[in-house]
Amino acid sequence: HSPRKWRHPVAASLVELGGVKIAREEIVKDDPTNNVPDSIFSKLGMQLHRRGQHPLGILKNAIFDYFDTNYPNKFNKFDDLCPIVSVKVNFDDVLVPADHVSRSYNDTYYVDSQTVLRCHTSAHQAELLREGHTHFLVTGDVYRRDSIDSTHYPVFHQMEGVRVFTPADWEGSDTDATSYAAEDLKKCLEGLARHLFGGVEMRWIDTYFPFTNPSFELEIFFQEKWLEVLGCGVMEQEILKRSGRTDNVAWAFGLGLERLAMVLFDIPDIRLFWTTDERFTSQFSKGQLGVKFKPFSKYPPCYKDMSFWISDSFTENNLCEVVRGIAGDLVEEVKLIDNFTNKKGMTSHCYRIAYRSMERSLTDEEINDLQWKVREQVESKLKVVLR
Ligand code: FA5
Ligand code: MG
């Protein structure tokens, strides 16, 4: 498939990609090398970031404004690259070690053993560098098996930014190439934060990514907590070298667009980005940055606890996938509230599931029915023993 063009679904069971129609059966397969559920297939091709009146589209355009103002005609923009990519570009090309957890079937959606739904927009870094691009922004939907709460969703959006420097850029300064790039990167992102938010409380955290060194995360204080909104750093020299740019240095960042939009518009729950409820959608319009979301109502949550003896293969992501598969966006949070190991070495977990609709009140009957199905499938699919 051509990686260049990515279109809206033409039918519920078909997505179109560069003029090529891909059937559901090619993406959701009953095969051990495939772990893409229907709920994820149905999000392919939605491209919320390309809708001008959607909070993610408004945010994307505001970020573009910042780059257009500060670096006129410098950054090439891509927002239509296909999310179905090879294991090579998603992991190998950005130096993710062979045994890194992000490669596991527990963390990533595999279409087959060599093909994944990209788990980050960094999947496009090396290819675009090889094509000769030196300043670019890549926006797209990314996919991850992950936990369930108000700031995590299995499909979200990132914007990748890459800027390559040549020796002429840092030679005039009194720092080395790496420090020069790191300083420029932080200045660029702090400027972006000011452009978007005016003043917010934020802090830099040192971290690790396989593809950058040094690496940083930016956190913003939101809803009484520090929220991680982006990762970034100075690109590993090896990536540049393999793209034929031995003498250069570069920085790269990956913005979590939902997280930034939550801060910008005061959106309390990440599920809202997917709602078609007019009480949400009508609050946003093209180009309007100053809007604060007014919650239309908060329906009561309903909590259900579930305890079971886990098996060696149990993972929280697998549990979340089962719950999401049954309850969809009616599940607000899945949280481990108790965990102990008995004398025989058996480990018990108790999870609390919060059910709450963003749009309406749920009935007891409906929730009991969901919880019953969850219990059934948790037992049959996850090989745990309910207590
Ligand atoms: C990455 O994905 C790196 N590729 C970012 C990067 C690019 C680093 C270039 C260096 C250079 P991370 O896994 O931390 O990093 O995700 C980046 C951002 O995506 C996070 O800071 C967060 O804002 C957002 N994010 C991660 N997981 C989720 C999720 N499940 N739901 C919503 N947003 C998420
Ligand atoms: Mg992170």
Image (cartoon, rainbow, N blue to C red):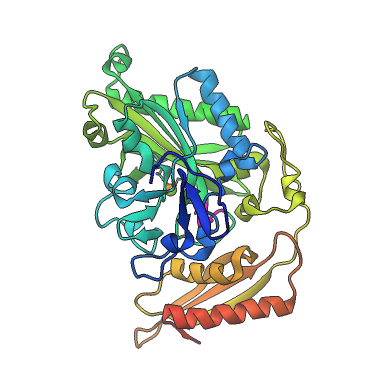
Q: Nearer the viewer, residue 257 or 40?
A: 40
261 over 289 or under it: above or below: below
- What is the total number of numbered labels drawn onto the structure image? 0
Q: Is residue 259 left or right of residue 169?
A: right
Q: Residue at x 35, y 25 (%)?
A: 134
Instruction: Examine the rendered structure and indicate whether residue 276 appears above or below residue 169.
Output: below
Q: Quadrant of residue 108?
A: bottom left
Residue at point 54%, 69% (across, down): 325
Q: What secondary structure is the stretch in magenta mostly built from?
A: loop
10 to 345, vertically: above or below:
above
Give the percent coordinates (x, y) of residue 379.
48, 83
Q: Is residue 206 visible?
A: no
Q: In the rendered image, which quarter is residue 282 located in?
A: top right
Residue stretch rendered in magenta on the structure: 151-155
Q: Residue furthest top?
A: 172
Residue 357 percent location from the top left of the image: 69, 63
Please name whichever residue, 57 or 316, is drawn nearer the observer in this view of the structure: 57
Can you see residue 118? yes
**Up-down relation of residue 77 to residue 344 (above or below):** above
Give x and y (percent) for residue 155.
51, 53
Is 338 a magenta residue? Answer: no
Direction from residue 304 to residue 319 in the image, left or right: left
Q: Left or right: 60 with respect to 294?
A: left
> Which residue: 32% across, 37% down?
127
| x and y, in percent, of residue 67 in the image | 51, 24
In magenta stretch: residue 154? yes
